Image (cartoon, helix red, strand yellow):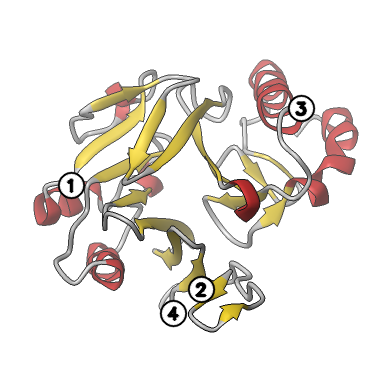
Amino acid sequence: MTSADGPRPDTYTGETAPGGPTALRVLPSLMIRKASVGPMDNSAYLLTCRVSGAQLLVDAAADAPRLERLVREGSSTSRLDTIVTTHSHHDHVGALAALVRATGARTAAGAADAPDIAVLTDVLLRDGDVLRVGVHDLEVIGLRGHTPGSIALLYRGGEDGDHLFTGDSLFPGGVGATQGDAERFSRLLDDVTARIFDRLGDSTWVYPGHGPDTTLGAERPQLAAWRERGW
């Protein structure tokens, strides 16, 4: 992280709580805000391009008034260009209709999950697609298993590191729930291994759909144990 006075340490931890303040990470050309909403401690992330002012929200999960305040933290005009839904589960879309009405943002979600989202999805996403937030590319990573169309978003920040928004597909300590279905679990762990751990370095920061953040380096040593335990 840098400031007008020169480099300073990045103090972002990703620790948030419902009703609590926003966690803010400031990169040279991108700001990342994290807020916890709703009874299930859902994490919503607002990405703000510092060059263009464009904004993208990851998961309009719950508590629309709180998320509208989050949007205003990044833009005094309440600009919101895109809302990305990482998957179709109800606790990740509870405020989606209200945010679309309030901001006029376009919606985006995994193609396989879109039919299960009550709000019309404007942009159907598949593995390998690219979304833009201002001057920044976000790579779409398909992660099948938690739901058929779950996605993660990857921002490759170069010297500022890789930043990965994983929804409910990857958390500290394991992959997302698959309701005891061995085939779904295997598919999800295979995708997480091949499309994330095999491609990205240990310093990659992971922003999950609930609770605290982690890094790939912290989770990588556990991959074999996850597969052995089966969840």
Foreground label between 4 and 2: 4
Mark 1 Cα shell of 10 Å, populated few (<14), some (14-19), many (≥20): some
Foreground label between 2 and 3: 3
Question: 117 above or below 39?
Answer: above
Closer-to-camera residue (164/54): 54
Marked residue nearer the N-terminal end (4 or 3) = 4
Quarter of the figure with residue 227: top right
Closer-to-camera residue (75/68): 75
Going by the numbered disc 3, the residue's amino acid type is: Asp
Question: 12 above or below 222?
Answer: below
Query: Is the C-beta separation of discs 2 and 1 under 8 Å?
Result: no
What residue does disc 4 label?
21
The residue at the point 75 percent across, 34 percent down is 231
Going by the numbered disc 2, the residue's amino acid type is: Ala
Q: Position of residue 143 (x, y in %)?
A: 57, 26
Q: Position of residue 131 (x, y in %)?
A: 37, 33
Q: CA distance from mark 3 to mark 1?
A: 36 Å
Q: CA distance from mark 2 to mark 1?
A: 23 Å
Marked residue nearer the N-terminal end (2 or 1) = 2
What residue does disc 1 label?
97
The residue at the point 23 percent across, 70 percent down is 72
